[in-house]
Every structure is written in C-alpha cells, then in structure tokens.
Amino acid sequence: MWCELLKNISKDCQFAPPASDEDLAEIEQALKLPFPEDLASLLKESNGVLGEYGLGLVWACDRIKSDNHMFRSNPDFKQLYMPFDGLFFFGDAGNGDQFAFSVCDGEVRRPDIFVWDHETDGRTWIAPSLKRYLQGWLTGEIKV
C-alpha cells in the first residue's frame, strides 16, 4: 500500500527491502517506546524511503534508532534544546529540520506529524498523518 501510494505521487522515491518485526522490536526496546502503527506498516514494506536527491523522507530502522537515541542522550543538546523525549523522529527535510511523531506519557497517541526546527528548537504541527505528510512533502504542499 505505502510503496504504491508513493510511486503514484513521485517517480523520485527509492525503496529498500522490508524491515522485519525484529528490527521494529529492537527500536521499541532501545527507545522504550511503542512504534507508531503507520510508520511500522510503511517500514514493513520498505525499510526507509528516499526522495529526490536522496532525501530521507522516512529513515531506515537503524537511523531511527540511532538518531532518536542521540537526541535523547547527547549532553550538549540538554543545554541547547528542550527535551526530545516528546518526539519520535523518523525523517528529515535535508536542511537540519526533522520530522517526528509526538510522544505523550511514553507512547505515540496521535497520528499527527510535527517538524522540529533545528535553528529555533520550535516544534510545529505540519500534517494530521504520515500519509498526508508524505503526500504534502512530495507534492510541495508542505515546505519547511
């Protein structure tokens, strides 16, 4: 479903072999967060999606795990930014800004997508779902 949807929007998308249930469970265990349902579904079709110029529309499992861990544990970030425990990062805009689900009380409760602005530390709502984020980004409707 996901790959077909994206292929219909843009010919620039590149797909990877599917992620395994074990890959997703490893991230959940490492971050102590349940995986967002739509993101898990997409990754089970393609372990990451690259857009035009190799842009990380949706990161592969390894990057999701490493970047979320780094943002939560980097001591320098604790002095520069608000805590990142409220965000589950999964992609980037190619300019330093990152896309995330909102985390509340240790779980992703809503499908909404936010963008974290690396210059201002702002967290802004951009789409009501992963599907709308991907459609909007690929068509140019969403810009950061």
Image (cartoon, helix red, strand yellow):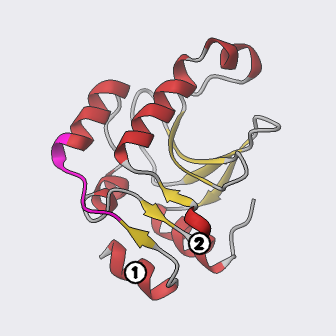
The x, y position of residue 94, in whole percent, is 67, 55
Q: Is residue 37 left or right of residue 65?
A: left
Q: Which residue is pictured at 43% across the width and 63% down the height?
A: 49
Residue type beneath disc 2: Glu
Check disc 1 and give the amino acid type: Leu
3D distance between C-alphas at marks 1 and 2: 16 Å
Tag 2 secondary structure:
helix
**Residue occupied by mark 2:** 52
Whether residue 76 is visible here, answered yes or no, is: yes
Which residue lies under the disc numbered 1? Answer: 5
The answer to whether residue 108 is seen in the rendering is no
Rendered view: 3 above or below 73: below
The prevailing secondary structure element of the residues shown in magenta is loop
Asked if residue 82 is among those painted magenta in the image, a careful observer would answer: no
Outermost residue toward the right in this view:
120
Sequence-earlier tag: 1 or 2 = 1
| Mark 1 element type | helix
Q: Where is residue 137 in the image (x, y as percent from the top left)?
A: 62, 70
Mark 2 closeness class: few <14, some 14–19, many ≥20 residues within 10 Å: few
Query: What x and y, as percent, mark residue 105?
Result: 44, 27
Magenta part of the chain: 16-22
Q: Nearer the viewer, residue 134 or 16?
A: 16
